C-alpha cells in the first residue's frame, strides 16, 4: 500500500468510495451523491495544508482516502483542522484507515497545526476506535445534531493536540 497526495485524476475513485457512504450509511451527513465535477473541485480546493491523500493498492487502485479541511471559517480557528477518512468497503480491516490517518496526522503536525478534530457519527465504533488508537480523545458529544434516513444522529467529537 502507498499513501500519496491525491490529484484530480483520483476524483472518480474518491467519488465512488464516498458516494457509497452518502447513499447507504450515516458516516457522512451529505444527503446527495457528488458529481464528478463536484468531486474534482473538492480535490482542487484542497492543496497545501488542507490536503487530500489516497491509499493505493500494489496494483495502483485507490482503496481509501482522507483529508484535512479547515475546521471553521473564522481566523481564530486557523490552527485547527478537521480530518476525514474513508476506506473502500472491500478493503476495510486491513490497515488502510490507520495508514491514512497516520499520514494526515503527520502532515497536520508538519504544517504547524495545533489541533486535529474528528467529528464522527454516534455509534460508529470502528471510527472512534481508529481515532483513539491514533491518540485522539473524546471531547464532546452532540445529541441529535443531524438527520438522515429518517433518524436523528449524534456526533462524537474527538481531538488530538500537538505540543
Image (spheres, helix red, strand yellow):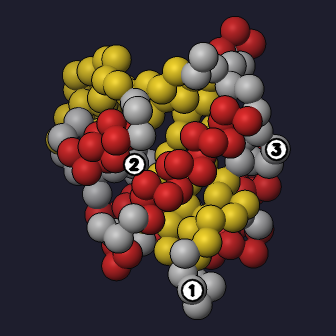
Q: Nearer the viewer, residue 59 or 32?
A: 59
Q: Nearer the viewer, residue 150 or 98?
A: 98
Looking at this rendering, what residue extends furthest in the top direction?
76
Q: Residue at x 61, y 72 (%)?
A: 2
Residue 73 x %, y %: 68, 21
Above or below, comparing residue 29 to residue 112 in the picture: below
3 or 1: tag closer to the N-terminus: 3
Marks 3 and 1 sit apart, C-alpha to C-alpha, by 26 Å
Q: Residue at x 50, y 49 (%)?
A: 101
Nearer to us of marks 1 and 2 is 1
Image quarter of the N terminus: bottom right
Q: Residue at x 34, y 79 (%)?
A: 90
Q: Tag 3's secondary structure?
A: loop
Residue 62 placement, left or right of 132: right
Instruction: Name the mark on residue 48.
Output: 3
Residue 49 placement, left or right of 91: right
Above or below, comparing residue 119 to residue 106 in the picture: above
Marks 1 and 2 sit apart, C-alpha to C-alpha, by 28 Å
User: How many numbered marks are there?
Assistant: 3
Among the 4 quarters of the image, the one containing residue 129: top left
Among the 4 quarters of the image, the one containing residue 137: top left
Instruction: Name the mark on residue 58.
Output: 1
Structural crowding at the residue carrying mark 2, measured as other residues with C-alpha within 10 Å and reported as few (<14), some (14–19) or many (≥20): some
Looking at this rendering, what residue extends furthest in the bottom direction?
59
Structural crowding at the residue carrying mark 1, measured as other residues with C-alpha within 10 Å and reported as few (<14), some (14–19) or many (≥20): few
Residue 20 x %, y %: 39, 68
Q: Residue at x 71, y 48 (%)?
A: 51
Above or below, comparing residue 110 to residue 99 in the picture: above
Whether residue 40 is visible to the viewer of this picture, yes or no, is: no
Residue 116 x %, y %: 54, 29
Looking at this rendering, what residue extends furthest in the front direction?
163
Q: Badge 2 is on which residue?
A: 28
Amino acid at each position: 500500500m502507498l499513501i500519496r497526495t491525491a490529484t484530480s485524476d483520483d476524483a472518480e475513485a474518491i467519488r465512488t468510495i464516498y458516494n457509497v457512504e452518502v447513499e447507504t450509511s450515516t458516516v457522512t451527513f451529505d444527503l446527495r451523491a457528488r458529481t464528478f465535477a463536484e468531486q474534482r473541485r473538492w480535490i482542487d480546493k484542497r492543496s497545501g495544508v488542507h490536503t487530500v491523500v489516497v491509499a493505493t493498492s500494489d496494483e495502483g487502485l485507490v482503496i481509501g482516502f482522507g483529508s484535512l479541511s479547515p475546521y471553521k471559517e473564522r481566523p481564530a480557528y486557523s490552527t485547527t483542522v478537521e480530518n476525514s477518512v474513508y476506506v473502500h468497503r472491500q478493503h476495510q480491516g486491513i490497515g488502510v484507515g490507520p495508514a491514512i490517518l497516520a499520514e494526515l496526522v503527520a502532515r497536520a503536525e508538519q504544517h504547524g497545526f495545533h489541533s486535529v478534530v474528528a467529528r464522527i457519527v454516534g455509534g460508529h465504533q470502528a471510527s472512534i476506535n481508529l481515532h483513539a488508537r491514533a491518540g485522539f480523545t473524546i471531547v464532546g458529544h452532540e445529541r441529535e445534531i443531524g438527520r438522515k434516513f429518517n433518524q436523528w444522529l449524534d456526533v462524537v467529537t474527538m481531538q488530538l493536540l500537538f505540543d
